[in-house]
Amino acid sequence: MTSLDTTPRSGADTFARYAMITAAVISPLTIAVSILLAPGDVTSEGEAYVRQFAASASAYPMFAWLSAISAIAIIPAALGVARVARRGRPTLGFVAMILAFIMIVPVAGDSDDVLYAGIKAGLDPAELTKLYTAYGEGLPTSVLGMSFLLGLVGFLLMGVAALLGRSAPAWAAIALIVGPVVVPVAWFAGLGNVFAGVAWLVMTVGMGGVALGLLNER
């Protein structure tokens, strides 16, 4: 890997680079922290998830704010990671960026917000389960909930572009390739909070590490 570029830059340019690097760490890290601190199993589904959520609803506001921080930070984070990926493989990096932004655009709502609103409205667990199921499966746009997976594919391809183009450290690019694979595995296999949290820590290493390539730009 080449040495850090020492070409003089404006204060705004330097701020933008470090802001994107910081965001690339904060966005996935807040998700990892919220999962590891969650009182219930975030990888459970259906009635089991609803009952766990209802039992710990008082803690939800904190997790909602962590989610909001992550959602805000993911925008500059994705731009920074994509910038490094595109430097190595422009076409692949561009396609990866488009796919990644599918995850960022709020085409699907947040079922946890709906559950929390239902609890505040006084719905019992049976009614909450029906609402949760209908929200996840009964809306015209419910299928767009799977767009999250396309976003993960986008980040994986950013890792591939950074690795092939040698625009970021190999360890970071590999982490960004592995992270998007293990994140959905945690949910589909119901592996629990520790595995899910560690998966997002891998994403943190990958995104933050690839974003460090911003410091090598000329």
Image: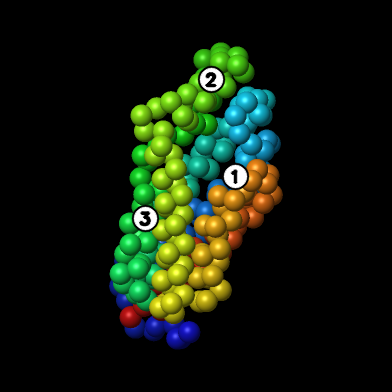
Secondary-structure class at tag 3: helix
Q: Is residue 181 left or right of residue 215?
A: right
In the depicted structure, whether residue 36 falls above or below residue 82: above
Callout 2 amino acid: Lys
Residue at the (51%, 64%) spot, across then down: 176
Task: State the residue in front, 218 or 194.
Answer: 194
Q: Earlier in the sequence, mark 1 or mark 3?
A: 3
Callout 3 amino acid: Leu
| Residue corresponding to mark 3 | 99
Visible in this render: residue 7? yes
- Quadrant in the picture for residue 39: top right
Q: Earlier in the sequence, mark 2 or mark 1?
A: 2
Q: Earlier in the sequence, mark 3 or mark 2?
A: 3
Residue at the (41%, 71%) spot, across then down: 161
Task: State the residue in front, 62 or 9.
Answer: 62
| Residue corresponding to mark 1 | 187
- Quadrant in the picture for residue 181: bottom right
In the rendering, at what x and y percent does residue 20 appear? 41, 62
Between the C-alphas of marks 2 and 1, the distance is 21 Å
Residue at the (39%, 83%) spot, across then down: 5
In the rendering, at what x and y percent does residue 43 appear? 62, 41
Secondary-structure class at tag 1: helix
Work out which residue is located at the far bottom of the displayed protein and give it: 2
Task: State the residue in front, 63 or 170.
Answer: 170
Q: Is residue 66 left or right of residue 83?
A: right
In the rendering, at what x and y percent does residue 59 appear? 62, 32
| Residue corresponding to mark 2 | 130
In the rendering, at what x and y percent does residue 104 appear? 39, 48
